[in-house]
Image (spheres, rainbow, N blue to C red):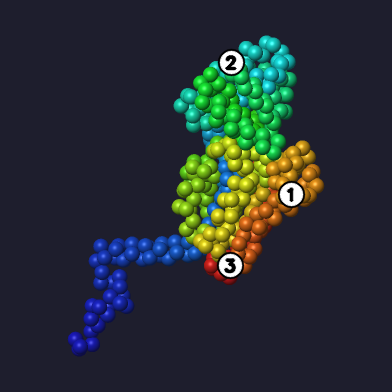
Amino acid sequence: MADFLPTRSVLNHYFPACLLTNTEVEQLRKSKAIDKGISRDKTYVKRLVKILLLGAGESGKSTFLKQMRIIHGQDFDQQAREEFRAIIYSNVIKGVRVLVDAREKLQIPWGSSDNQVHGDNVMSFDTRSSMMVHGQVETNVFLKYLPSIQALWADVAIQHAYDRRREFQLVSTLHTHAQMHTDSSGLCRLAEVKVKLSRDRRLAAASSFVSQWLSLHVCEGESVKYFLDNVEKLGEPSYIPSQHDVLLARKPTKGIHEYDFEIKSIPFKMVDVGGQRSERRRWFECFDSVTSILFLVSSSEYDQVLMEDRQTNRLRESLNIFETIVNNRVFLSVSIILFLNKTDLLEEKVLNVSLSKYFPEYTGPDHSLPDVQKFLVDCFREKRRDLTQKPLYHHFTTAINTENIRLVFRDVKDTILHDNLKQLMLQ
């Protein structure tokens, strides 16, 4: 009879929990849970849509990432928006200081001579404070300077300085006279003069002004006016930055920032990396398992230079970066989508600044937006050496416009999913 009794190994196979101790049962449960988790993670990774945001500094990558949070994830709640208050205060003080300095260098007379005192007040602000170095200003400090900021922005001299932000004139007292305008090479000459001025301590302040002026010209001009126009709101005790305020707040991206969200049960991971030259060495850290690249370009910057070297044309820099990315073997099977951003600023600029001054190869009408946009798209398309690659999609965008980004990303999402249907296991 004993010959017909099942062995322990057979019983373990058919009735695993019956002959195990409590400790063994718990270990088995944990093992199965781990296996299930590994399987789930593998499926998640295979389905994950990893989108890399690339482009030069100030192209709008961080703003686009903010929009993804607003549209597809958790909107900025009160606490999150409050964190931007110190950044906005810093943007405003920095912008006003540049304009006050510009008024003096451009020799624009005050609308009211009383505002000289207010100008001296904001220029005495300590830009070396620990918070200002990190692009932040405390509320109590901002309120101390608020009356001066309000008086200055209301003065016609500061308004005139802002209107002339594309122009610069510097007269040296040391037997030199340099006059510059931001025409086809004005900003490059401006940079050269900065280098020369730096050699003489007596003109250190003027050299510093050049750096600040370029900063306003290429960096904050599009948002500083908005905040100054609404400066009374910023000074209210109950002020909490709005969604639009958050989108316009400017702070250079340092390091790598990721944002995860889902659309119809499909996981997305968007990765934003700093676009300044010093940050681009980090880009390679994000290249693994990329599904798509959104390459952002500030389309309105065809007449501006980099903050990093004051000489390189910003649009040409974007073209050079794009050429490197689009022809990299790592991205042969990756969907690359071109976002020609800041369309609203481009529309304004083509009416006043001729593209042909900076890109002589452009032979179309100077003030035709469609012709300028077509030229820009063609410039980027021509950078692709292998025309058998996936199609290059492009969109004209305004990153601070939530509805525009919502519509554009809906199309982008469909393009990415269609192009990667097989590898994302979505059949």
Q: Please state, as top left, top right, bottom left or bottom right, where the N terminus lies in the image.
A: bottom left
Q: Nearer the viewer, residue 403 or 126?
A: 126
For the residues marked 3 and 1, what is the alpha-carbon distance in whole angstroms? 39 Å
Q: Report how many numbered discs are placed on residues in the image.
A: 3
Location of mark 1 (residue)? 362
- Crowdedness near tag 3: few (<14), some (14–19) or many (≥20) residues, C-alpha within 10 Å: few
Location of mark 2 (residue)? 121
- Which residue is situated farthest in the front direction here? 175
Mark 3 secondary-structure assignment? loop
Q: Is residue 426 above or below residue 49?
A: below
Mark 1: which amino acid? Tyr
Q: Quadrant of residue 159?
A: top right
In percent of width and height, residue 45 lies at: 48, 61
In percent of width and height, residue 315 lies at: 64, 45
Mark 3: which amino acid? Leu
Q: Earlier in the sequence, mark 3 or mark 1?
A: 1
Q: Is residue 26 above or below residue 217?
A: below
Please report the residue visible at 60 percent of the width from the left and 48 percent of the height from the top. 318
Which mark is in front, 3 or 1?
1
In percent of width and height, residue 330 lies at: 51, 61
Q: Earlier in the sequence, mark 1 or mark 2?
A: 2
Q: Nearer the viewer, residue 88 or 425?
A: 88
Q: Please state, as top left, top right, bottom left or bottom right, where the C terminus lies in the image.
A: bottom right
Please report the residue visible at 67 percent of the width from the left and 11 percent of the height from the top. 114
Observer able to see residue 317? yes
Q: Is residue 369 above or below residue 106?
A: below
Location of mark 3 (residue)? 421
In percent of width and height, residue 111 lies at: 73, 15
Mark 1 secondary-structure assignment? loop
Mark 2 secondary-structure assignment? helix
For the residues marked 2 and 3, what is the alpha-carbon distance in whole angstroms? 60 Å
